[in-house]
Structure formats: structure tokens, C-alpha cells
Amino acid sequence: MTKYLKLLRVEQWVKNLFVFAPLFFSGNITNFDLLLKSIFAFAVFSLAASSIYILNDYSDIESDRKHPEKRNRPLASGVISKTTAIGVFVVLVILCIALIISGQQFFHLNYLKFATIIALYFLMNIAYTFKLKHIAIIDVTIIASGFVLRVLAGGYATGIYISQWAILLTFVLALVLAIGKRRGELINAQISGKTRKALDGYNVQFADIALSISCTLAIVCYLMFTLSPEVQQRFHSRVFYTVFFVVFAFLRYLQQTLVYNKTESPTKIIYKDRYIQITLVLWIAAFLLQIYFK
């Protein structure tokens, strides 16, 4: 069972929590009907994402066998055969389609828009897997766009309006994560002397500049989000003060990356760094107080 969970990369489903963002920030997390719709959207997106992970591992099986960490993946290590992996992929796609169709009947979703988002995510990542992940800048743009699609899926599933600043904020935040991951791969490549085609078009200096620009854009977008009319109307001026948590978190992340030269992916840094963890808890607590405990 464990090998199949690794094949599906269940630990990566945490990214799909972005589908809950519209529900959380709208103050409707206690609305049981909307919560069910968000859970449904999370389940569909998780199945779609896992099918893409299988396809990606299948196409990268030879290169993964040469990687110090990725060689332990089920396909690269041979724990799961190619035939079995393709079978699981087909089952996931069928389940995903079946859930989308049933969602129209049981949850009364905005069926066409929600289905379009899932289809777009699937097709975009197939193109990424077989071609676009080898093209610098386009690769990280597609990764960031995937997070935007997650938020849009949550919005269409619940019928909650998503502001333009929220969409742009999601994009640049995901861009920070994607570029940070590329930078870590570049540092590891310098240490091991091994590189791969996906890193063509990048170097550490470019990654540092792009990362700094993306962090700056994320802070500006968050600031504009807090000052947007719909947010000000709901929370008044109080939400503006959460900007301080966001600025500190990004500065700490840049310090870990550029000063201490951490080579882990951004998500691993978040899991390990106590300062960022405490800041995130305080930021979430501040929003919870403003949304649910006025």
C-alpha cells in the first residue's frame, strides 16, 4: 500500500489546499454546503494531480534512476512496474471524470467552468511533462499557473468571487516556490556535478534575481489585496496590519536561501524553519480573529 501512496505522491496533496482559499477568506468555512463543495474540488484536483505525477515519473524513469533521491521513487526503483503505473493512471483519470460528472448532480457546481479548469490543468501538465518543463521560465510559469487553477477551481466549486489581486497574489507566490526549487536544484547540481535538461537556461545569479523580484511582487500584491475595496469592506483597515507578517516571512525565506544558501525546496524550508512557522501561525490566527471572531 505504501508504494502506491508514494506513486500517487499523497504528500504533495497539500498543494491542493489552495482550493479552500476562496472559502476561507470569504468567511464561509462554517457553511457546511460550501465546505462539502470545496472538499469535493480538493478530491478531484488531487486525483488529477496524482495522475500527472505518475505520467511525469513514467517519462523521467531513466533520469530519476541517476538522481540520489528520485531513484527511490516506485517506478525508478522498480517497486512498481510500468504496466501497473499506467493502469493506475487510467483508473485515476476515469475516477476524476466520474467525480466531475457526479458533482453536477449532487453538488450543483458551476459544472462547465469547473470541468474546464480541471481539463486545462490536465492538458497543461501533459504538455509540461513531455516538453515544456525543459524550457526555462515557461516551466516555472506553468507551475505557478497550476496554483491559480487550484484557487479558481475552489471559487467555481463554491460560487465565491475571487478578486484579481488574489489571483495575481497566488501566481507570484507560487512563482516564488517554483524559482526557489530551481535554485536549490542548481546548487545541488554544482555540488554533485550532475545537471539535467530542465535546468538549461538558468544559473544561480538569475535565480537569485528572479527570486528577489518575485518576493517583492508577492508583497506588493498582498498589500494591494488588503487594500482592495471588497477586502476593506469586509475587514475594514484591520487586515492591512497582517502585511507585517507577510514581509517578515518573505525576508526570512530570502535570508535562508541567499545568506545561508539552503538548497532545500521552499516547502521543506517552511517545514523546518521555526521563525517562518510561527509567522504563518500568527498570520492565520490574525485572519481567523478578523473573519470568525469579530
Image (cartoon, grey):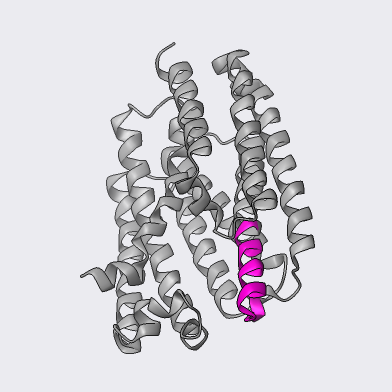
Tell which of 103 and 14 is nearer to you: 14
Tell me if 38 is positioned left or right of 159 in this view: left
Tell me if 179 is positioned left or right of 120 in this view: right
Q: Residue furthest top?
A: 294
Identify the residue at horizontal 43%, vertical 80% (top origin).
Answer: 71
Q: Which residue range is magenta in the image?
A: 180-198
Q: Quadrant of the C terminus?
A: top left
Tally of numbered tags: 0
- The reply to whether residue 58 is visible in this rendering is yes
Dominant secondary structure (helix, strand or loop) of the stretch shown in magenta: helix
- Residue 109, given in percent of the width and then of the height, sits at 39, 45
Q: Quadrant of the N terminus?
A: bottom left
Tell which of 87 and 11 is nearer to you: 11
Identify the residue at horizontal 66%, vertical 32% (top origin).
Answer: 247
- The reply to whether residue 160 is visible in this rendering is no
**Quarter residue 208 falls in:** bottom right
- Residue 225 vs 136, above or below: the answer is above
- Residue 32 vs 168, above or below: the answer is above
- Residue 18, given in percent of the width and then of the height, sits at 47, 45
- Residue 20, given in percent of the width and then of the height, sits at 43, 40
Identify the residue at horizontal 76%, vertical 73% (top origin).
Answer: 201
Residue 188 falls inside the magenta stretch: yes
Q: Residue furthest left?
A: 1
Tell me if 127 is positioned left or right of 251 in this view: left
Tell which of 135 and 92 is nearer to you: 135
Residue 161 falls inside the magenta stretch: no
- Residue 147, given in percent of the width and then of the height, sits at 54, 52
Identify the residue at horizontal 66%, vertical 69% (top origin).
Answer: 186
